[in-house]
Image (tube, rainbow, N blue to C red):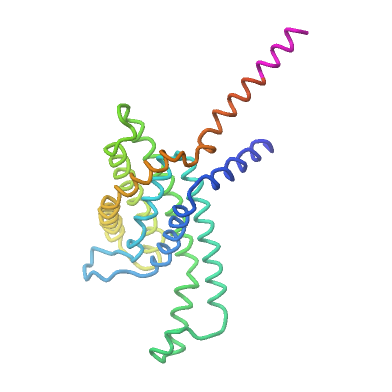
Amino acid sequence: MKQALKKYFSDFRLLLSSVPPFTFSIFILAIFAMNLLANKSIDLNLDWLALDAGIIVSWVTFLCMDVLTKHFGPRAATQLSIFAILINLFMCLILFLASLIPGTWGAFFDFGEAEVINEALDSTFGGTWYVVIGSTTAFVASAFINNFSNWGIGKLFKGNPDGFAAYALRTYLSTAIGQFADNLIFALVVSHVFFGWSILQCFTCAATGMVAELVIEAAFSPIGYRVLRRWKQKGIGSLYLDRDVEAAQSEAESNFKTENTEENA
């Protein structure tokens, strides 16, 4: 057990050092912004339709997960997703502590309603426990669903698994499934219970949000494909990707030496 945990954390440290920092930074920022913007509902003047402002950046997180899954595999992408959400929770804690500090927000100078403005902004940035729990639960579940469905769909392409057609189909389908799950779980856990959304609104939010985010990601998918090609050309993450092969070779060499020693004895 101890040896397995040691290997797990050793592999994870190698994974973190293998992922391009810019991509992982964008991934973390998108998750943080998505969960913060989820506090704001979008007024569409339709009783059956409800959306939150997190839709603006949530597609970025799925684009990053699709790229990470294709290059590093679903297990690695899910590990990175969980690590990113832990960083997000840490930032939520910092914002919560900041909301407890006595003081005045800058908006006071524009509107002059200090008490109302400070309470509203402290509540928004400080977060609400059910929003944090709901968004965390929804993202972890959707990350697992997205990453492994992306990998599974990719297995269907035998002829040209690295072509754009394969990348596009596995990305679009997994994103549609993952986005719908993410939106629906958050809507049911948070919006239905605490904001009074109807079940119909929860499902329409999940469906319309999925469509909107999928369209945006589809528009930017060529960028993700180019990033993947560049990573492959430059051998990005080769130390992590080749670690199992090296370990197998090392074990085979060790077994070979042991057998020769026993025969000579």
Q: Is residue 31 left or right of residue 158?
A: right
Magenta stretch secondary structure, dominant: helix
Residue 239 is one of the magenta-drawn residues: no
Q: From the top left corner, tell me how far across and down residue 185 is, in percent.
A: 39, 54
Q: Nearer the viewer, residue 117 or 105?
A: 105
Q: Is residue 257 left or right of residue 152?
A: right
Q: Is residue 73 left or right of residue 163?
A: right
| Quadrant housing residue 59 | bottom left
Provide the residue span drawn in magenta: 255-265
Q: Residue at x 24, y 63 (%)?
A: 49
| Quadrant housing residue 252 | top right
Q: Nearer the viewer, residue 125 or 131?
A: 125
Where's the C terminus, which quadrant?
A: top right
The outermost residue toward the bottom is 112
Q: Residue at x 40, y 62 (%)?
A: 34
Q: Residue at x 50, y 54 (%)?
A: 84
- Whether residue 113 is situated above or below residue 204 in the rendered picture: below
- Whether residue 190 is situated above or below residue 265 in the rendered picture: below
The outermost residue toward the left is 46
Where's the N terminus, which quadrant?
A: top right
Q: Residue at x 70, y 11 (%)?
A: 260
- Whether residue 53 is situated above or below residue 69 in the rendered picture: below
| Quadrant housing residue 40 | bottom left
